[in-house]
Amino acid sequence: MGTPLKPNEPGNNCTVCWGPGKPFGNGPTPTVIQLRLTSLLPGEYADDADFDNLLVTHYLEQTGLPCTFNIIDGNLSWTVAWNSTNTYIGVYDFGTLRPVFQGYIDEVCEVDLPSTLISPSGNIAWNGFANITWDLEGL
């Protein structure tokens, strides 16, 4: 399960996080990043999701925006976005808009975030952590 790994290659430069003096270093921005969720707890709508699939690494591809990565896996949308003021991670059922994971922090270029969902009410899952990595091979 999960999404298949596509070859990594340099993408459009996300100058917020990659480049001289930036948090992720001088190397090129990858086209693929890896997002892994851990420690999720079932929410009110837990039956709407395959929890085994939620807890495997997903490979997100760079979108038209150089600092945003996304993938649709089944009925879930997985998104990571960095901008000049914050880091955002969101996993939602795109049909019902019920959240699985939502992480937001007013820090630039973070790769580890806790969920901001603090209750099972109205959610597919809640609690948990997200970790973002990428493979340097092929860059």
Image: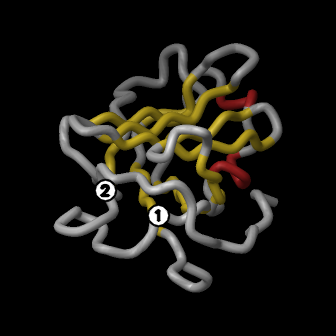
Report helix, strand or loop for mark 2: loop
Name the spot of residue 69 as percent of width and height, x first.
56, 46
Q: Quadrant of the N terminus?
A: bottom right
Q: Residue at x 39, y 75 (%)?
A: 27
Name the spot of residue 89 as percent of width and height, x first.
44, 39
Q: Amino acid at mark 1?
A: Thr
Name the spot of residue 24 as percent of width and height, x first.
30, 67
Instruction: Read off the residue under disc 1.
Output: 29
Q: Amino acid at mark 2?
A: Cys
Image marks 2 and 1: residues in contact by CB distance under 8 Å: yes
Tell which of 14 and 112 is nearer to you: 14
How many marks do you count on the picture?
2
Q: Residue at x 52, y 55 (%)?
A: 12
Number of residues whose C-alpha sits closer than 10 Å to that of mark 2, classed few (under 14), some (14–19) or many (20 or more): many
User: Residue 18 lies in what quarter of the image?
Assistant: bottom left
Q: Residue at x 61, y 42 (%)?
A: 63
Instruction: Read off the residue under disc 2.
Output: 17
Q: Is residue 125 shown above or below 121?
A: below
Tell which of 102 and 80 is nearer to you: 80
> First in sequence: mark 2 or mark 1?
2
Q: Is residue 66 shown above or below 19?
A: above
